[in-house]
Image: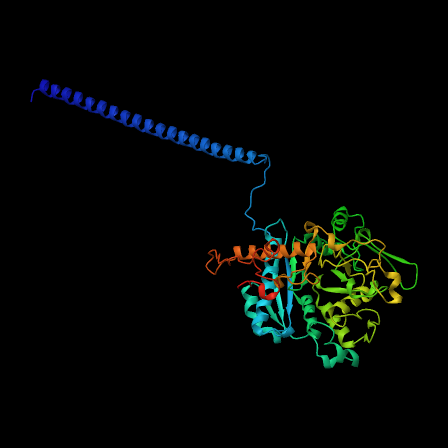
Amino acid sequence: MAPSLRRNNNITNNNSSGRIRISLSLTCLLVTAFSISLIIGLVFQFIAVHRIGNRSNDHINNAAAAASLMRGATTQNAPQQQNKPPKKKPVIAYTVTITGCSEKNYSAKEATSLITQGAAVLQHSIHLAHTTTSSKYDYQMYAIIHPAATSCSVTPMKQLGYQVLVRNTPFHNSDIQTKFLRENIDGASCCGAKEFLKLYAYTLKEPVAVILDLDSLVLRPMDELFDVMLMEDENIGGDGQYDHHHDDERRKMVDQLPIHHRSTSSDGSNHKEDVSSSSLYNKRIDAFYTRDYNMINPGGEKYAGVQGGFLMLRPDEDVFAEYVDLVLQGNYIDGRGWGGKYGYFYGGAQVQGICSYYFGELHPEKGVELNRCRVNQMVDAPRFDMKMKEKRYRDARGKCRDGREQCEDCRETDVKDIWSVHFTLCGKPWFCNSNLQPLCSKLHSEWFRIRRSYEESRSDDNGNELRLLPKLEGSYRPEIYHGYCTGGGERGYLPLKI
């Protein structure tokens, strides 16, 4: 080939190679530029997303802070909320005792009916006191039943929500050391030795137990009494004295208690025993009770029985054992009572007398007497009868039964001031009495009001409302008996069905 032609071909090849190198360089530049733009785009996208997330978090935080401020909180150094379980309320035990099914010549069927009337309305009154108010306490109902009463009471009491405890008398009569008490402990009372079933309240697990009779009614919470009894144990010294004498909180608590303020003379002397709120500021209280001054003669007020229809106590197995030992020792003297002083009256050989002996003689530091016009109200007359015929009692005519110079007339107490009722002198509401003292009429009306509330509120096992309300056909004194009595006496009463 000619040299000129080869030279042209080389020139052509060189030009082609140059174009190819240029093309490749441009391609690399384009790829590099695209990669850089893609990286930049991803970076901007990440920044944008991050900012949006921060703004979203800021919005959430600001919303939470605003809500917190609306609730009156502060956003500065605010502690984190924790889901704590609700604090359980302390439980108060309420006990009733059932000793038989055929007392007072009632058949088992009639006894069951009478038991359920009182038990149902009492339970509901306690339920209302603990649930429809701001009470700080819950409650548990107990029925302490003697084996002789199981056939007529176990089933209905369980149906009414009572926890049933079947118990024998806590001692054998044959083990009582003294002949007189051994032979007479079943006499002069409603229930004989079986009444000591009430002492089993001392064996319960709850911090406070309240002994009531079935013919009782609770009209308001008794938190003030529970509060004082349940003050922190660390504030009580080994001698039973409250360590903080000037504790304002305790003073306020004690000052509002319905205490029976008395000033009584001791035996044959001019010494006065003052019982007031201030004397309780530094005292540990293990029991509250009322006394029955209707059972004693003039001059015996200091030895009046503890009324068996109400006793609030601090459960303690040792105290239970001490009571049983007292019975077995048999220090009950014929014609004089426990320790020769306490309990020579109806029911005195049983709980009313031995509790009076316990709190009056053996352990006066443990119990406090309450105002019987407020707690365990029985609507009793405050003064001795002006018509007393016995010469030795003439000087006592018209004087206060409790030994005070001035005494409150429980028959004139306003219903709103009454904490609990005991239907003794007023008669049982289900007897549809025809002749009632004015306050008794009001208290019977309260019982029937609460009965109606119970019937309206109970439900069946499925939780559905059960409103099988009886037709209130009774036209006998409807302002008192709310249509539940067709006539005077037990036969006129429309019984509650369980």
Q: Quadrant of residue 304?
A: bottom right
* 111 or 150, nearer to the observer: 111
x, y percent for residue 337: 81, 72
Residue 185, percent from left and from top? 74, 76
Q: In the rendered picture of this protein, how many numbered marks are placed on residues?
A: 0
Look at the picture and state if 397 lies above or below 74: below
Left or right of 457? Residue 356 is right
Q: Quadrant of residue 76?
A: top right
Q: Quadrant of residue 242?
A: bottom right
- Using residue 252 as the reference point, say whether residue 494 is left or right of it: left
Q: Is residue 75 above or below residue 394?
A: above
Q: Position of residue 27 (x, y in %)?
A: 24, 26
* Residue 120 horizontal side relative to residue 56, left or right: right
Q: Residue at x 61, y 70 (%)?
A: 165
* Image position, residue 392 (x, y; %): 89, 66
Is residue 153 at least partly visible in the picture?
no
Q: In this picture, is 342 found above or below 406?
A: below
Q: Is residue 177 left or right of residue 419?
A: right
Q: Is residue 180 placed above or below 299 in the rendered structure?
A: below
Furthest residue to the left?
Answer: 1
Q: Residue furthest top?
A: 4
Identify which residue, 256 or 451, lies in the foreground: 451
